[in-house]
Amino acid sequence: MTHILSPFTALCTVGFFARLSYALARSPVLPLFALYLGAGPEAIGFAVGVSTVTGIFFKLPAGALSDVIGRKRTMMIGLFFFAFMPFAYLLVRDYNLLIVIRFIHGLATAVYGPVAMAVVADIAGRNKGEMLSWFSSVTIIGNLLGAPLGGFILHRTAGASTSSLADFQYAYLASGIAGLFSLALALGVLRNDKPVAEGRGVKEAFRKFISGIKEVLSDRRIAITSAMEGLQNMTVGALEAFLPIYAVSVAGLNEFQAGILWGVQVVTTILSKPIMGKTSDQYGRKALIAAGLVICALSFGMIPVFKNFYLLMITAAFFGLGEALVQSSGAAFVADLCKEKHFGTAMGTFGTIFDIGHATGPILAGFLLASHSYLFSFQVMAAMLLLAAPVFVLTVRAEEPTPLR
Protein backbone atom coordinates (compact mmCIF):
# COMPACT_ATOMS: atom_id res chain seq x y z
CA MET A 1 0.00 0.00 0.00
CA THR A 2 2.85 2.39 0.79
CA HIS A 3 4.20 2.03 -2.76
CA ILE A 4 0.76 2.48 -4.35
CA LEU A 5 -0.31 5.67 -2.56
CA SER A 6 1.68 8.89 -2.34
CA PRO A 7 2.05 10.29 1.22
CA PHE A 8 -0.49 13.02 0.47
CA THR A 9 -3.00 10.62 -1.12
CA ALA A 10 -2.61 8.17 1.77
CA LEU A 11 -3.19 10.94 4.29
CA CYS A 12 -6.33 12.07 2.45
CA THR A 13 -7.70 8.51 2.25
CA VAL A 14 -7.19 7.87 5.95
CA GLY A 15 -8.76 11.23 6.74
CA PHE A 16 -11.78 10.50 4.53
CA PHE A 17 -12.78 7.37 6.43
CA ALA A 18 -12.01 8.92 9.81
CA ARG A 19 -14.25 11.90 9.05
CA LEU A 20 -16.97 9.66 7.62
CA SER A 21 -16.97 7.75 10.90
CA TYR A 22 -17.16 10.91 12.98
CA ALA A 23 -19.87 12.51 10.83
CA LEU A 24 -22.04 9.40 11.13
CA ALA A 25 -21.87 9.75 14.90
CA ARG A 26 -22.57 13.48 14.90
CA SER A 27 -25.13 15.33 12.74
CA PRO A 28 -28.05 14.69 12.38
CA VAL A 29 -27.83 11.46 14.42
CA LEU A 30 -26.47 12.94 17.68
CA PRO A 31 -28.94 15.80 18.25
CA LEU A 32 -31.86 13.55 17.32
CA PHE A 33 -30.50 10.85 19.66
CA ALA A 34 -30.25 13.36 22.49
CA LEU A 35 -33.81 14.46 21.73
CA TYR A 36 -34.91 10.79 21.83
CA LEU A 37 -33.30 10.47 25.28
CA GLY A 38 -35.44 13.36 26.50
CA ALA A 39 -32.92 16.21 26.34
CA GLY A 40 -34.08 19.83 26.11
CA PRO A 41 -32.46 22.53 23.94
CA GLU A 42 -29.67 23.34 26.42
CA ALA A 43 -28.86 19.67 26.90
CA ILE A 44 -28.87 18.99 23.15
CA GLY A 45 -26.47 21.86 22.59
CA PHE A 46 -24.18 20.57 25.33
CA ALA A 47 -24.25 17.02 23.90
CA VAL A 48 -23.12 18.31 20.51
CA GLY A 49 -20.54 20.71 21.94
CA VAL A 50 -18.95 18.55 24.64
CA SER A 51 -16.79 16.54 22.24
CA THR A 52 -15.36 19.79 20.97
CA VAL A 53 -14.57 20.82 24.54
CA THR A 54 -12.16 17.88 24.50
CA GLY A 55 -10.27 19.57 21.68
CA ILE A 56 -9.90 22.74 23.73
CA PHE A 57 -7.82 20.82 26.26
CA PHE A 58 -5.97 18.39 24.00
CA LYS A 59 -5.36 19.91 20.55
CA LEU A 60 -2.50 22.18 21.57
CA PRO A 61 -0.67 19.47 23.58
CA ALA A 62 -1.24 16.97 20.75
CA GLY A 63 0.18 19.33 18.14
CA ALA A 64 3.18 20.18 20.31
CA LEU A 65 3.73 16.50 21.11
CA SER A 66 3.87 15.70 17.39
CA ASP A 67 6.72 18.20 17.01
CA VAL A 68 8.68 16.13 19.54
CA ILE A 69 7.76 12.44 19.04
CA GLY A 70 6.70 12.53 15.38
CA ARG A 71 3.52 13.27 13.46
CA LYS A 72 2.49 9.76 12.48
CA ARG A 73 2.85 8.25 15.95
CA THR A 74 0.62 10.99 17.32
CA MET A 75 -1.91 10.56 14.51
CA MET A 76 -2.28 6.86 15.31
CA ILE A 77 -3.44 7.71 18.83
CA GLY A 78 -6.30 9.76 17.39
CA LEU A 79 -7.20 7.06 14.88
CA PHE A 80 -7.65 4.50 17.67
CA PHE A 81 -10.39 6.71 19.11
CA PHE A 82 -12.02 7.03 15.68
CA ALA A 83 -12.07 3.25 15.37
CA PHE A 84 -13.34 2.09 18.76
CA MET A 85 -15.38 4.86 20.41
CA PRO A 86 -18.44 4.58 18.08
CA PHE A 87 -19.18 1.13 19.52
CA ALA A 88 -19.50 2.67 23.00
CA TYR A 89 -22.70 4.43 21.88
CA LEU A 90 -24.36 1.01 21.71
CA LEU A 91 -24.33 1.02 25.53
CA VAL A 92 -26.12 4.36 25.87
CA ARG A 93 -29.53 4.30 27.56
CA ASP A 94 -29.49 7.70 29.25
CA TYR A 95 -28.25 11.22 28.57
CA ASN A 96 -25.46 11.24 31.19
CA LEU A 97 -23.63 8.29 29.62
CA LEU A 98 -24.01 9.91 26.21
CA ILE A 99 -22.15 12.98 27.52
CA VAL A 100 -19.28 10.88 28.89
CA ILE A 101 -18.88 9.01 25.61
CA ARG A 102 -19.07 12.20 23.57
CA PHE A 103 -16.26 13.77 25.62
CA ILE A 104 -13.99 10.75 25.14
CA HIS A 105 -14.88 10.46 21.45
CA GLY A 106 -13.66 14.04 21.06
CA LEU A 107 -10.10 12.80 21.56
CA ALA A 108 -10.28 11.41 18.02
CA THR A 109 -10.37 14.79 16.30
CA ALA A 110 -8.47 16.53 19.12
CA VAL A 111 -5.37 14.40 18.55
CA TYR A 112 -5.67 13.62 14.83
CA GLY A 113 -6.85 16.96 13.45
CA PRO A 114 -3.99 19.40 14.16
CA VAL A 115 -1.32 16.78 13.56
CA ALA A 116 -2.68 15.86 10.12
CA MET A 117 -2.71 19.55 9.18
CA ALA A 118 0.87 19.90 10.39
CA VAL A 119 1.92 17.01 8.14
CA VAL A 120 0.39 18.78 5.15
CA ALA A 121 2.07 22.06 6.13
CA ASP A 122 5.39 20.19 6.34
CA ILE A 123 5.20 19.11 2.71
CA ALA A 124 3.33 22.09 1.19
CA GLY A 125 6.12 24.66 1.00
CA ARG A 126 4.72 28.04 -0.09
CA ASN A 127 1.50 26.46 -1.40
CA LYS A 128 0.02 25.98 2.05
CA GLY A 129 -3.33 27.57 1.22
CA GLU A 130 -3.92 25.32 -1.78
CA MET A 131 -2.67 22.06 -0.25
CA LEU A 132 -4.33 22.55 3.13
CA SER A 133 -7.56 23.33 1.27
CA TRP A 134 -7.27 20.24 -0.94
CA PHE A 135 -6.60 18.09 2.10
CA SER A 136 -9.52 19.57 3.97
CA SER A 137 -11.85 19.25 0.98
CA VAL A 138 -10.98 15.62 0.32
CA THR A 139 -11.28 14.55 3.94
CA ILE A 140 -14.52 16.41 4.64
CA ILE A 141 -16.15 14.52 1.80
CA GLY A 142 -16.54 12.08 4.68
CA ASN A 143 -18.61 14.74 6.43
CA LEU A 144 -20.60 15.26 3.25
CA LEU A 145 -21.49 11.59 3.04
CA GLY A 146 -21.79 10.99 6.78
CA ALA A 147 -24.57 13.50 7.49
CA PRO A 148 -27.12 12.37 4.87
CA LEU A 149 -26.09 8.72 5.36
CA GLY A 150 -26.81 8.99 9.08
CA GLY A 151 -30.15 10.66 8.34
CA PHE A 152 -30.94 7.99 5.74
CA ILE A 153 -30.22 5.17 8.20
CA LEU A 154 -32.62 6.71 10.73
CA HIS A 155 -35.28 7.43 8.13
CA ARG A 156 -35.04 4.03 6.44
CA THR A 157 -35.17 2.01 9.65
CA ALA A 158 -37.74 4.17 11.40
CA GLY A 159 -40.01 4.68 8.40
CA ALA A 160 -42.89 6.99 9.23
CA SER A 161 -42.64 6.38 12.98
CA THR A 162 -40.38 7.96 15.56
CA SER A 163 -36.81 6.62 15.60
CA SER A 164 -36.15 3.87 18.14
CA LEU A 165 -33.00 2.97 20.08
CA ALA A 166 -32.18 0.27 17.52
CA ASP A 167 -32.34 2.82 14.69
CA PHE A 168 -29.63 4.94 16.34
CA GLN A 169 -27.54 1.84 17.04
CA TYR A 170 -27.46 0.99 13.33
CA ALA A 171 -26.01 4.44 12.65
CA TYR A 172 -23.30 4.03 15.30
CA LEU A 173 -22.41 0.57 14.01
CA ALA A 174 -21.83 2.12 10.58
CA SER A 175 -19.68 4.79 12.24
CA GLY A 176 -17.57 2.14 13.95
CA ILE A 177 -17.01 0.20 10.74
CA ALA A 178 -15.76 3.32 8.95
CA GLY A 179 -13.45 4.12 11.87
CA LEU A 180 -11.97 0.62 11.86
CA PHE A 181 -11.29 0.87 8.14
CA SER A 182 -9.47 4.17 8.66
CA LEU A 183 -7.28 2.64 11.35
CA ALA A 184 -6.54 -0.48 9.28
CA LEU A 185 -5.53 1.66 6.30
CA ALA A 186 -3.34 3.87 8.47
CA LEU A 187 -1.47 0.87 9.86
CA GLY A 188 -0.43 0.09 6.29
CA VAL A 189 0.58 3.55 5.11
CA LEU A 190 1.71 5.62 8.12
CA ARG A 191 5.25 4.38 8.67
CA ASN A 192 8.85 5.61 8.80
CA ASP A 193 8.12 8.30 11.37
CA LYS A 194 10.64 10.51 13.12
CA PRO A 195 10.45 13.52 15.43
CA VAL A 196 10.37 16.94 13.76
CA ALA A 197 12.32 18.61 16.54
CA GLU A 198 15.43 16.57 17.11
CA GLY A 199 16.64 16.17 20.67
CA ARG A 200 17.97 13.65 23.14
CA GLY A 201 16.29 12.46 26.27
CA VAL A 202 13.02 13.17 28.01
CA LYS A 203 14.24 16.45 29.53
CA GLU A 204 15.27 17.89 26.15
CA ALA A 205 12.02 16.73 24.54
CA PHE A 206 9.99 18.40 27.28
CA ARG A 207 12.00 21.61 26.89
CA LYS A 208 11.24 21.69 23.15
CA PHE A 209 7.59 20.95 23.90
CA ILE A 210 7.27 23.93 26.28
CA SER A 211 9.37 26.37 24.20
CA GLY A 212 7.33 25.64 21.09
CA ILE A 213 4.08 26.38 22.90
CA LYS A 214 5.45 29.64 24.34
CA GLU A 215 6.77 30.83 20.98
CA VAL A 216 3.51 30.22 19.16
CA LEU A 217 1.23 31.60 21.88
CA SER A 218 3.22 34.84 22.06
CA ASP A 219 2.34 35.73 18.44
CA ARG A 220 -0.67 38.09 18.47
CA ARG A 221 -1.29 37.50 14.75
CA ILE A 222 -1.82 33.78 15.29
CA ALA A 223 -4.19 34.46 18.18
CA ILE A 224 -6.32 36.97 16.25
CA THR A 225 -6.53 34.86 13.09
CA SER A 226 -7.41 31.78 15.11
CA ALA A 227 -10.09 33.78 16.95
CA MET A 228 -11.76 34.66 13.64
CA GLU A 229 -11.86 31.00 12.72
CA GLY A 230 -13.22 30.19 16.17
CA LEU A 231 -16.06 32.69 15.81
CA GLN A 232 -16.97 31.37 12.39
CA ASN A 233 -16.88 27.84 13.76
CA MET A 234 -19.25 28.91 16.53
CA THR A 235 -21.99 29.16 13.92
CA VAL A 236 -20.93 25.84 12.38
CA GLY A 237 -21.36 24.15 15.76
CA ALA A 238 -24.77 25.77 16.26
CA LEU A 239 -25.92 24.55 12.85
CA GLU A 240 -24.70 21.01 13.55
CA ALA A 241 -26.77 20.92 16.71
CA PHE A 242 -29.94 22.74 15.72
CA LEU A 243 -30.32 22.70 11.94
CA PRO A 244 -31.58 19.06 12.15
CA ILE A 245 -33.93 19.97 15.02
CA TYR A 246 -35.20 23.07 13.19
CA ALA A 247 -35.65 21.13 9.94
CA VAL A 248 -37.60 18.28 11.55
CA SER A 249 -39.48 20.04 14.36
CA VAL A 250 -40.18 23.49 12.86
CA ALA A 251 -39.88 23.23 9.08
CA GLY A 252 -41.62 19.83 8.97
CA LEU A 253 -38.90 18.03 6.96
CA ASN A 254 -37.83 14.42 7.49
CA GLU A 255 -34.52 13.15 8.88
CA PHE A 256 -33.08 12.42 5.44
CA GLN A 257 -33.83 15.96 4.25
CA ALA A 258 -32.22 17.31 7.44
CA GLY A 259 -29.06 15.39 6.57
CA ILE A 260 -29.20 16.69 2.99
CA LEU A 261 -29.24 20.29 4.23
CA TRP A 262 -26.01 19.70 6.12
CA GLY A 263 -24.59 17.87 3.12
CA VAL A 264 -25.32 20.82 0.81
CA GLN A 265 -23.34 23.10 3.07
CA VAL A 266 -20.43 20.66 3.19
CA VAL A 267 -20.30 20.02 -0.57
CA THR A 268 -20.23 23.76 -1.24
CA THR A 269 -17.30 24.06 1.15
CA ILE A 270 -15.52 21.14 -0.51
CA LEU A 271 -15.86 22.55 -4.02
CA SER A 272 -14.87 26.07 -2.98
CA LYS A 273 -11.92 25.44 -0.67
CA PRO A 274 -9.21 24.46 -3.18
CA ILE A 275 -10.07 27.45 -5.41
CA MET A 276 -10.09 29.84 -2.48
CA GLY A 277 -6.92 28.31 -1.06
CA LYS A 278 -5.04 28.81 -4.32
CA THR A 279 -6.42 32.35 -4.54
CA SER A 280 -5.14 33.11 -1.05
CA ASP A 281 -1.67 31.80 -2.02
CA GLN A 282 -1.61 34.21 -4.97
CA TYR A 283 -3.30 37.33 -3.63
CA GLY A 284 -3.23 37.14 0.18
CA ARG A 285 -5.37 35.74 2.99
CA LYS A 286 -6.92 38.64 4.89
CA ALA A 287 -9.56 39.82 2.41
CA LEU A 288 -10.87 36.28 1.95
CA ILE A 289 -11.17 35.74 5.70
CA ALA A 290 -13.11 39.00 6.18
CA ALA A 291 -15.46 38.30 3.24
CA GLY A 292 -16.13 34.79 4.52
CA LEU A 293 -17.08 36.09 7.97
CA VAL A 294 -19.67 38.43 6.42
CA ILE A 295 -21.18 35.75 4.16
CA CYS A 296 -21.44 33.27 7.05
CA ALA A 297 -23.09 35.89 9.27
CA LEU A 298 -25.73 36.86 6.71
CA SER A 299 -26.62 33.31 5.66
CA PHE A 300 -26.67 31.97 9.24
CA GLY A 301 -29.05 34.72 10.31
CA MET A 302 -31.39 33.97 7.37
CA ILE A 303 -31.83 30.24 8.02
CA PRO A 304 -34.75 30.57 10.50
CA VAL A 305 -36.56 32.85 8.04
CA PHE A 306 -37.26 29.87 5.74
CA LYS A 307 -39.16 26.59 6.07
CA ASN A 308 -39.07 25.57 2.43
CA PHE A 309 -36.56 22.79 1.79
CA TYR A 310 -35.09 24.36 -1.35
CA LEU A 311 -34.72 27.82 0.16
CA LEU A 312 -32.98 26.26 3.14
CA MET A 313 -30.66 24.42 0.74
CA ILE A 314 -29.69 27.68 -0.98
CA THR A 315 -29.04 29.39 2.35
CA ALA A 316 -26.96 26.44 3.56
CA ALA A 317 -24.94 26.60 0.33
CA PHE A 318 -24.10 30.27 0.91
CA PHE A 319 -23.02 29.43 4.44
CA GLY A 320 -20.75 26.72 3.04
CA LEU A 321 -19.18 29.25 0.66
CA GLY A 322 -18.45 31.63 3.54
CA GLU A 323 -17.00 28.78 5.55
CA ALA A 324 -14.68 27.89 2.66
CA LEU A 325 -13.44 31.48 2.41
CA VAL A 326 -12.51 31.60 6.09
CA GLN A 327 -11.09 28.11 6.46
CA SER A 328 -9.09 28.05 3.21
CA SER A 329 -7.08 31.04 4.38
CA GLY A 330 -7.08 30.83 8.19
CA ALA A 331 -4.96 27.73 8.70
CA ALA A 332 -2.57 28.72 5.90
CA PHE A 333 -2.16 32.20 7.42
CA VAL A 334 -1.26 30.67 10.79
CA ALA A 335 1.24 28.32 9.13
CA ASP A 336 2.78 31.29 7.28
CA LEU A 337 3.42 33.02 10.58
CA CYS A 338 5.37 30.34 12.44
CA LYS A 339 8.60 28.40 12.08
CA GLU A 340 8.44 25.02 10.36
CA LYS A 341 9.61 23.14 13.45
CA HIS A 342 6.53 24.47 15.30
CA PHE A 343 3.87 23.67 12.69
CA GLY A 344 2.33 21.10 15.02
CA THR A 345 2.13 23.56 17.90
CA ALA A 346 0.71 26.29 15.64
CA MET A 347 -1.95 23.97 14.24
CA GLY A 348 -2.72 22.85 17.79
CA THR A 349 -3.17 26.46 18.91
CA PHE A 350 -5.32 27.18 15.88
CA GLY A 351 -7.35 24.03 16.51
CA THR A 352 -7.83 24.85 20.19
CA ILE A 353 -9.35 28.26 19.47
CA PHE A 354 -11.28 26.72 16.58
CA ASP A 355 -12.76 24.21 19.04
CA ILE A 356 -13.60 26.86 21.63
CA GLY A 357 -15.84 28.37 18.98
CA HIS A 358 -17.20 25.00 17.90
CA ALA A 359 -18.05 24.05 21.48
CA THR A 360 -19.50 27.45 22.33
CA GLY A 361 -21.83 27.49 19.32
CA PRO A 362 -24.26 24.71 20.23
CA ILE A 363 -24.14 25.53 23.94
CA LEU A 364 -24.85 29.23 23.38
CA ALA A 365 -27.55 28.45 20.82
CA GLY A 366 -29.14 25.99 23.25
CA PHE A 367 -29.39 28.57 26.01
CA LEU A 368 -30.77 31.20 23.63
CA LEU A 369 -33.35 28.78 22.21
CA ALA A 370 -34.52 27.82 25.69
CA SER A 371 -36.13 31.25 26.05
CA HIS A 372 -36.18 32.78 22.54
CA SER A 373 -37.16 31.91 18.98
CA TYR A 374 -34.88 30.42 16.33
CA LEU A 375 -34.93 33.74 14.47
CA PHE A 376 -33.81 35.80 17.47
CA SER A 377 -31.22 33.25 18.61
CA PHE A 378 -29.61 32.79 15.20
CA GLN A 379 -29.54 36.51 14.44
CA VAL A 380 -27.86 37.31 17.77
CA MET A 381 -25.07 34.88 16.89
CA ALA A 382 -24.93 36.21 13.31
CA ALA A 383 -24.43 39.73 14.65
CA MET A 384 -21.44 38.56 16.70
CA LEU A 385 -19.86 37.11 13.57
CA LEU A 386 -20.64 40.20 11.50
CA LEU A 387 -18.93 42.47 14.04
CA ALA A 388 -15.82 40.27 13.96
CA ALA A 389 -14.99 41.11 10.33
CA PRO A 390 -14.03 44.78 10.84
CA VAL A 391 -12.20 43.88 14.05
CA PHE A 392 -10.02 41.46 12.08
CA VAL A 393 -9.40 43.95 9.26
CA LEU A 394 -8.39 46.71 11.67
CA THR A 395 -6.19 44.66 14.00
CA VAL A 396 -4.25 42.54 11.46
CA ARG A 397 -2.57 44.90 9.03
CA ALA A 398 1.09 44.71 7.99
CA GLU A 399 1.33 41.05 9.04
CA GLU A 400 -0.30 39.86 5.81
CA PRO A 401 1.84 37.09 4.24
CA THR A 402 3.71 37.96 1.07
CA PRO A 403 1.58 36.92 -1.94
CA LEU A 404 2.94 34.42 -4.47
CA ARG A 405 3.28 35.70 -8.01
Image (cartoon, rainbow, N blue to C red):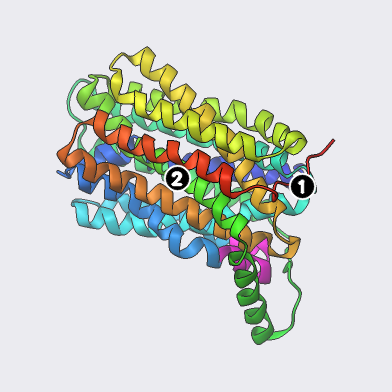
Percent x, y of residue 399: 69, 51
Q: Tell me the residue that label 1 is attached to.
A: 124
Q: Where is residue 58 in the image (x, y as percent from the top left)?
A: 48, 64
Extreme-right residue of the structure? 405
Magenta segment's dominant SS is helix
Residues packed near mark 1 inside 10 Å, few (<14), some (14 to 19) or many (20 plus): some
Task: Look at mark 2 in the image and give the residue it sits on.
Answer: 231
> Over which residues does the magenta segment extend?
62-75
- Up-down: is 357 above or below 385? below
Amino acid type of the residue tagged 2 in the rendering: Leu
Q: Depth check: 244 or 372 in front?
A: 372
Tell me the kind of residue under disc 1: Ala
Number of labels in the image equals: 2
Side (left or right) of 394 relative to 274: left
Q: Is mark 2 on a helix, strand or loop?
A: helix
Residue 138 in sight in this render = no
Crowding at dot 2, Cα within 10 Å, few <14 / some 14-19 / many 20+, comes out as many
| Residue for point 24% across, 57% down | 97
Residue 154 got which mark?
A: none
The reply, left or right, for residue 148 in relation to residue 8 is left
Q: Can residue 76 be seen in this view?
A: yes
Name the secondary structure under disc 1: helix
Residue depicted at x 44% and y 17%: 314
Of 184 and 145, nearer the camera is 145
Instruction: Name the residue at 69% across, 64% down.
Output: 342
Residue 70: x %, y % from top left: 68, 66
In the picture shown, does residue 291 fall above or below 53? above
* Magenta residue check for 70: yes
| Residue 37 picture quarter | top left
Instruction: Determine whether 319 is above or below 104 in the image.
Output: above
Query: Could you say where residue 93 lies in the image, as x and y percent from the top left?
Result: 19, 51
